[in-house]
Amino acid sequence: MDKTVKADPNKKHARPSSAKQRTTTVTSLLGGKIRLLRHNDNPMLYARSYVQGRYVSIRTMETGIRNASKVAEDWFFELKTRVRQGDQLHEPLFSDIVREFLVDPSIQGAVSAGTHGNYAKKWNVLEPLFRDVRVSAVTLEKLEDIRNIRAAETNRYGTPITANTIDKDISFIRQILRWGVERKSLAITVPPAPKRKGRFEVVKHGRPTFSLKQWRTVTLAARKRAQDAEKKRAAQERTPTPGRKVDVEKAWELYYFIVFACGGALRTGEAYSLRWMDCSETVLNTPDNTDEDAIHVLVLGKHSRGGQRENGWVLMGGVDAFHQLRQRREADRPDDTLFRYNHEPGFRELLKSLDLYTDPSSGMTRNTKSLRATGINLRLLKNPGVPLNDLRKWCRTSIVQIQHFYDQAHPESSAARVAGRSESSKTQ
């Protein structure tokens, strides 16, 4: 990163950018190993030496030769002590490499905007653990120390940091080091990841979904909350009282967000990325020659690169939710987003009120990510004959992901289909 301070040409007394700096050697110390320098007419003295193949310098903060010489010699002997201890004086700090990584255009273009945003959030959490740490000091032992520190911390909800989150921390650190080796020619070896055992064993499982009955409970409760908000707001307008007014638009938008995201099996970031210009009404002709209304959307998905949007289709109740939301927001411009609020807190509060926040079987919590998983799972329940290849294209994922994380139907439903027989088989 260029930290050169450039002169302001508009400033009255600015020095012309073409002017060269005049450096005068005042004296030499320790047989020429240190030189005291003065730049231009500045009375401040600087010390310069040649260590580990490069020139290094320091501002002594002194104007007298005697005091400056003492500061310079102390500084020089401190550098020599660090060299004997194995320090690489010119090696960059890990934090400097991270900052360059975050602004590298090749990285920004290789991942989606959401993923790149997560890099910055991840670094905000890890940065305090890397103060004054040079890249060569990021060893296997350092990774294990960071892992232990993170394991002792809690998240914003007061619960311990999960093994999955800690594993992502370690992967992010190693990704930075690999980038440094490839792009910055760092003479280091990227350490291996610590072994995932015990507390740090990563267990991959899908986000808990809602059953059909639970899904109806959630949508009905969200709609009722919006209706109650309208009544409360009307009462507040009839009898003005101090305090915050009920946000009716936010309450209705939460309901539309729930139905729309599930109807299109949208990731949370995909739903928030949608603008009105990215949505259009369409009609799908199904294999049984029936027409189904749908909303064609262009989302900034998990696999989007360079701002390129992916195709998606919102089905079932999501179509009605889209129409109702558009009626409430007729004054919006084409480039306005559909969902203007962060609905994670409201959705969490809704689930807690319904005692659906925690899944008893897995112990995991549900959040807005559960809407995508529920949308895929409901398609499997309502249309078990749909080819998985068609399903994975619709929801922009892979068949393996569907089988491992999204298909959470109870095995009894599969057994019932296996046990079922056609009419022709019954006569045999």
Image (cartoon, rainbow, N blue to C red):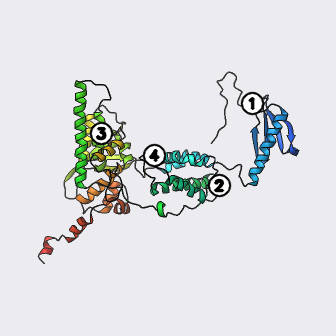
What residue is shown with label 2? Answer: 136
The answer to whether one can see residue 185 in this image is no
Residue position for label 1: 19
Q: Amino acid at mark 3?
A: Glu
Dot 4 corresponds to which residue?
113
- Counting residues from the start of the chain, the first of labels 1 and 3 encountered is 1
Mark 1 crowdedness (10 Å alpha carbons): few <14, some 14-19, many ≥20: few
Q: Amino acid at mark 1?
A: Ala
Q: Is residue 60 left or right of residue 398?
A: right
The disc at residue 253 is 3
Of the 4 image quadrants, the one containing the N terminus is top right
For the residue pair 361 and 225, the one nearer the viewer reads as: 361
Q: CA distance from mark 2 to mark 1?
A: 39 Å
**From what the image shows, is residue 343 above or below residue 382?**
above
Which residue type does callout 2 highlight? Ser
Horizontal and vertical percent position of residue 27: 86, 37
Amino acid type at circle 4 is Ala
Which mark sits nearer the N-terminus, 3 or 4? 4
Tally the marks. Answer: 4
Q: Which is nearer the N-term, disc 1 or disc 4? A: 1
Q: Is residue 179 left or right of residue 270?
A: right
